[in-house]
Image (spheres, coloured by chain):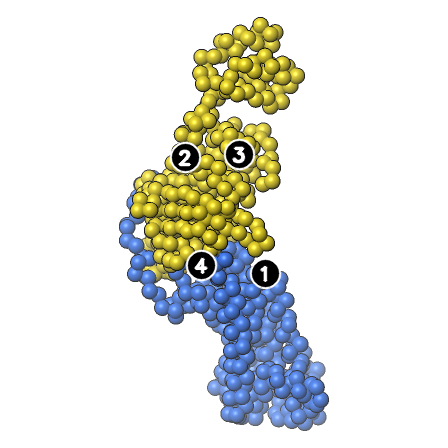
Amino acid sequence: MDTQNNTLPHKSYAKNNALSLPVNIFLLAVRSLTTLLRTPEALLPPVAISIFFLVIYQSTLGKAADFIPGIGGSYLGFILPLSIVSGSLSGSGIAAQNLVRDIERGYFDKLLLTPVRRSALLLAPILAGAVILGIQSTIVVSVGLLLGLTPATGFLGLLVVIGLGVLLGLGFAGFTVSAALGSGSAAATQGASFLFFPLTFLAPTFVPMSLLSGWLEIAAKVNPITYVLQAMRALLNTGWDVKAIATSILACLILAIIMYALAAFALRVRTRRN
Amino acid sequence: MKDSEILVENLIKTYPGKVDAIKGINFQVAAGKIFGFLGPNGAGKSTTIKILTTLALPTSGRAWVGGFDVIGQAPEVRRVAGVALQDIGIDPLMKSMELLVLQARLFGASKADATMRAHELLELVNLSEAANRKVGTYSGGMRRRLDLAMALVHQPKILFLDEPTTGLDPASRRDVWREVRRLNREMGITIFLTTQYLEEADELADTVAIIVDGKIATEGAPAKLKSQIGQESINLVFESSEIAQQALNTLEKMGNRIQLDRDTVRLYLSEAAGSIPSVVNILQNAGLSPISLTLTQPTLDDVFLQVTGQRLVAPEGLGSKNLRSLRQLEGS
């Protein structure tokens, strides 16, 4: 081994450390994104599946707009939100998978040995997951455009659609991240992601809300996905519906508050010294 | 406490379900020294290191690292202590350069300083050429060296190494030893190291504490410990264990202590070398002739045997003569 140049400058960085939370989050989020982009095999399937269903729904049910009342425009504009939402749900597990990988590999402990802000350990992978979700939603929307989608609210409306998709995904990410922190196991985290799958169908998934009744109507009413779907559909098919957009944002926020309270608790348990 | 970089008082750790991991240990480590914490698997070494590095809390007792209380001043402890845990916590998808820069930045270095520091450390642990390769492609030895570099990003005064060479081949092991010695001698870093290898403790440590079953069995400089139990021995190997048994009976009154291990008789004497002629003489008169006769200095292994009544078995062979043909330590 090289024996020269072994005196290191004795300047301690540690003393003047007062990194702000945003810098902590930024540093760790960049690192999460780096590793995520190095595993494209984990990122591509959710997009591929979303696109696959989009094409299938459009080809098999594309004519449904003619006989299902209340679709209010093209069937593509009606069904594309479903693809985005299901992409958001499967993508909401990305942050958690990233986190659980770090826990299993011991890198999480290594980070705990630095002065890093504990909340950054939670928020950074979620931010990285949100970036990925945004990219995934953009791809799905682009495929929609290729299939002939003409959004009623134009380019700006598409951005809101993507934004809503990300917001919904972030809310659910709070849950999967809680599972990751709580269990520290990749399998359990994977399992937690599957819990959302049925939620996609307890909503006005294939037909408008007006056609739902009974228990399904009640379930759909408390399901935040319902409001996100409705806002997206309005944006794509009928035009700016401020009330629908506000309601969907509110629904996502309520979901996020509950999920992040859970995540914050799980983080405290995980980082507690015992 | 003023002169000790590490001070541990009556430390006890009981895990839920009443498993006593450590049962009231005391020790101190002087600044600039290498302290070897030696013991079999499950003796309490990792628990101790987790408490000292703020990853775990003791059930009772107190400890200070660099003058800071590990319970109440965890952030300060993290700033003066560098830690390389037994499970190397690095992300295989990252490159070593990226990991080091991030680690330095989390300790508050600017991007430029962090980059400079990463270059220095990669040079120090001889990984400069692999700086931009994903860590997943590294060998075990390279990962250990990277882990060591990561523990050093913030210029710690005290370095904790939890079994730094477990699972390494002999060549990588010697590389790590060389690094550890260099960090201690040239940079004055106080080092607390746990190990299951007697040879490693003997090689590196100024002071060794032997921990068995959550308690410190003995503590001191390796040379002092060896001289305490203190005797050289004459080892005689015979053709069969029956003949060895006869030799044992014949020689019983000669040494301070005598041991039989299958075909080998070990005779502990204060003046072993000078006693060889008379030992040979006695054996010849009894019609017994050994097929080999060797003289050994006491080893830490003998110390371990003396204080615990058992031999320490390392997880995989070191190829060391000290560790050959040792029996599995019971209950480890």
Spatial CA span between label 2 and label 1: 42 Å
**Residue highlighted by disc 3:** B308
Residue A36 image offset from top left, x and y in percent: 51, 64
Element carrying mark 2: strand
Residue B188, quarter of picture: top left
Chain with colour yellow in the figure: B
Q: Please, is residue B273 above or below residue B66 in the view?
A: above
Q: Count residues near mark 4 (Cα–Cα under 10 Å), then give few for <14, some for 14-19, many for 20+.
A: some
CA separation, marks 4 and 3?
36 Å
Label 2 sits on residue = B220
Q: Nearer the viewer's eye, disc 2 or disc 1?
A: 2
Kindly report the distance in space between the C-alpha atoms of the residues bearing marks 3 and 1: 38 Å
The chain to which mark 4 is attached is A
Instruction: Report whether A190 appears left or right of A159.
Output: right
Q: What residue is at 52 percent from the left and 92 percent from the top?
A: A243
Residue A147 or residue B190, whichever sits in front: B190
Q: Chain of mark 1?
A: A
CA neighbours of label 2 inside 10 A, class few (<14), some (14 to 19), many (20+):
some
For marks 4 and 3, give the one nearer the viewer: 3
Of callouts 4 and 1, the N-terminal one: 4
Identify the chain drawn in blue. Answer: A
Q: Could you tell me how far apart the alpha carbons at marks 2 and 4 are, in whole angstroms?
A: 33 Å
Q: Which residue is mark 4?
A: A112
> Which residue is the extreme one toward the top?
B285
The secondary structure type at the circle numbered 3 is: helix
Q: What type is the residue that disc 1 sits on? A: Ser
* Residue A185, numbered label: 1
Residue type for callout 3: Thr
